[in-house]
Image: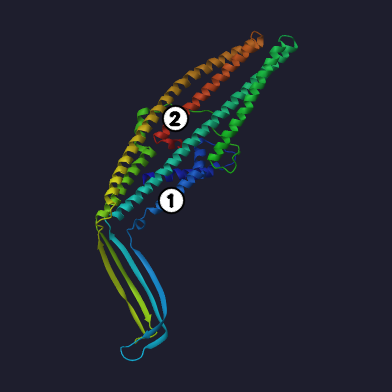
């Protein structure tokens, strides 16, 4: 019930967000992108429908707990020729004798007991219902993680485009200064050609980066299942904000308690146990009840009676037991092995998740340290570029040295941007493994 309530809450939030996101020109936050995607994404909609099927199947009637009621009616006729030979006398021949039978009735069949198989089937359907909810949750969590990563990739690519635009501006200004200095003879033609080559190189990078920004935009619109994958998207975030307050112990605790894949593995173990109980039901007797009410009319073409009518109730019960079927013990042994395999698979999954958590945690901590270092480098590179520009304007610095200072600044901006994005990816992975990925919807 808690699982279903969680999923319904997420999908309801998606419906609200979908309406809000339609407002023309409104900047999109990550939360609003996620809400819109949860409402429209095809994978999410398909898995929601599959969960509805598993919900519909989890009924007492589908498990066989309820009786079946059949209404039947029929008619049959027979056209016969008869030859009767008495012990004395001549044979009597009658042709075209037409006998008719009309019948109608209601029949009730009910399996009262079949070795607890019906009750086990009902529990199995309920487990499958929970499994459907877990599959929905896993799909939603995968979608949230994918869209969140792509959202921040779009932020990263947009910031990188801004950096390249700034680089083009710097190169254009340097080219302008070089051209003026070349005209008055302060700079050589080599300086001019080098400045033009650097300007063209920066312009080429800027054009290529525009393609990467557009590719990320298309991917975002695809994930949100928008009608136009090329539709422009205005987002609120202009920075990649990293959560540096995650704690390894808390992440591990949440993973063991709420990770959807682990919960699904637990359901698989429970299903394997129910499969064994279903097979063990054949060791018990079964009791079946049948009852009905019928009416029958017989019309005779050649009989002492012209017609005969019968009606009334009937009731019966069947008690039986399967003494031997040749496969029972083998199937039960295999079912016990399947339970063991399900438990081993669950343990293997937990070990794998622990390893993934440890790997991402190490990468997360390293990237946080790297981010601090790159922030210091960016401050130094910015100051170095400002000093270099002042000296370049005074003619105390060559074009090559100025280009090196510019390149150092761009490289520092690129490294800090990459460190921020890589840290964010580690954060997203840690939140998903710990079962807390839906916090990005808050």
**Measuring 62% from the left and 28% from the top, which residue is drawn there?**
208
Q: Mark 2 highlights which residue?
A: 427
* Residue most extreme to the bottom: 89
Task: For label 1, count other residues whose C-alpha is less than 10 Å away and answer few (under 14), some (14-19) or many (20+).
Answer: some
Task: For label 2, count other residues whose C-alpha is less than 10 Å away and answer few (under 14), some (14-19) or many (20+).
Answer: many
User: Residue 23's spot in the image, x, y percent?
Assistant: 57, 42
Q: Nearer the viewer, residue 71 or 174?
A: 71
How many marks are shown on the rendered structure? 2
**Measuring 42% from the left and 24% from the top, which residue is drawn there?**
365
User: How far is the residue under mark 1 from the one under mark 2?
Assistant: 32 Å
Q: Mark 1 highlights which residue?
A: 52
Quadrant of the image containing the C terminus = top left
**Measuring 36% from the left and 56% from the top, which residue is drawn there?**
62
Of callouts 1 and 2, the N-terminal one: 1
Local secondary structure at mark 1:
helix
Left or right of 270? Residue 427 is right
């Amino acid at each position: 019930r808690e699982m279903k309530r969680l999923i319904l809450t997420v999908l309801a939030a998606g419906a609200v967000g979908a309406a809000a996101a339609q407002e023309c020109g409104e900047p999109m936050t990550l939360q609003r992108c996620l809400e819109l995607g949860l409402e429209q994404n095809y994978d999410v909609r398909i898995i929601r429908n599959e969960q509805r099927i598993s919900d519909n199947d989890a009924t007492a009637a589908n498990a066989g707990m309820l009786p079946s009621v059949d209404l039947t009616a029929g008619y049959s006729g027979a056209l016969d020729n008869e030859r009767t030979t008495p012990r004395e006398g001549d044979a009597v021949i009658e042709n075209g004798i037409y006998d008719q039978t009309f019948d109608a009735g209601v029949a009730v069949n009910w399996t009262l007991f079949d070795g607890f198989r019906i009750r086990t089937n009902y529990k199995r359907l309920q487990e499958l219902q929970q499994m459907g909810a877990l599959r929905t949750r896993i799909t939603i969590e995968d979608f949230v993680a994918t869209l969140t990563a792509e959202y921040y990739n779009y932020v990263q690519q947009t910031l990188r485009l801004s950096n390249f635009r700034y680089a083009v501006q710097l190169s254009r200004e340097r080219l302008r200064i070089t051209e003026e200095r070349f005209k008055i003879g302060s700079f050589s033609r080599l300086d001019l050609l080098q400045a033009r080559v650097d300007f063209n190189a920066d312009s080429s990078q800027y054009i290529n980066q525009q393609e990467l920004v557009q590719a990320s935009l298309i991917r975002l619109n695809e994930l949100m299942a928008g009608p136009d994958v090329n539709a422009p998207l205005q987002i609120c975030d202009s920075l990649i904000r990293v959560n540096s307050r995650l704690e390894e112990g808390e992440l591990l605790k949440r993973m063991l308690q709420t990770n959807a894949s682990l919960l699904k593995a637990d359901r698989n173990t429970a299903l394997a146990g129910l499969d064994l109980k279903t097979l063990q039901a054949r060791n018990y007797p079964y009791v079946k009840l049948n009852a009905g009410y019928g009416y029958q009319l017989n019309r005779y073409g050649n009989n002492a009676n012209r017609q005969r009518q019968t009606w009334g109730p009937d009731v019966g019960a069947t008690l039986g037991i399967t003494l031997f079927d040749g496969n029972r013990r083998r199937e039960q042994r295999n079912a016990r092995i399947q339970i063991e395999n399900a438990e081993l698979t669950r343990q293997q999954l937990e070990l794998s998740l622990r390893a993934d958590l440890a790997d991402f945690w190490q990468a997360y901590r390293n990237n946080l340290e790297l981010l601090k270092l790159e922030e210091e480098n960016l401050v130094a590179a910015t100051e170095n570029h400002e000093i270099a520009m002042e000296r370049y304007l005074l003619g105390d610095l060559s074009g090559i040295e100025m280009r090196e200072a510019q390149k150092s600044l761009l490289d520092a901006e690129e490294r800090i941007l990459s460190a921020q994005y890589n840290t964010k990816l580690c954060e997203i992975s840690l939140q998903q493994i710990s079962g807390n990925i839906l916090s990005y919807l808050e």
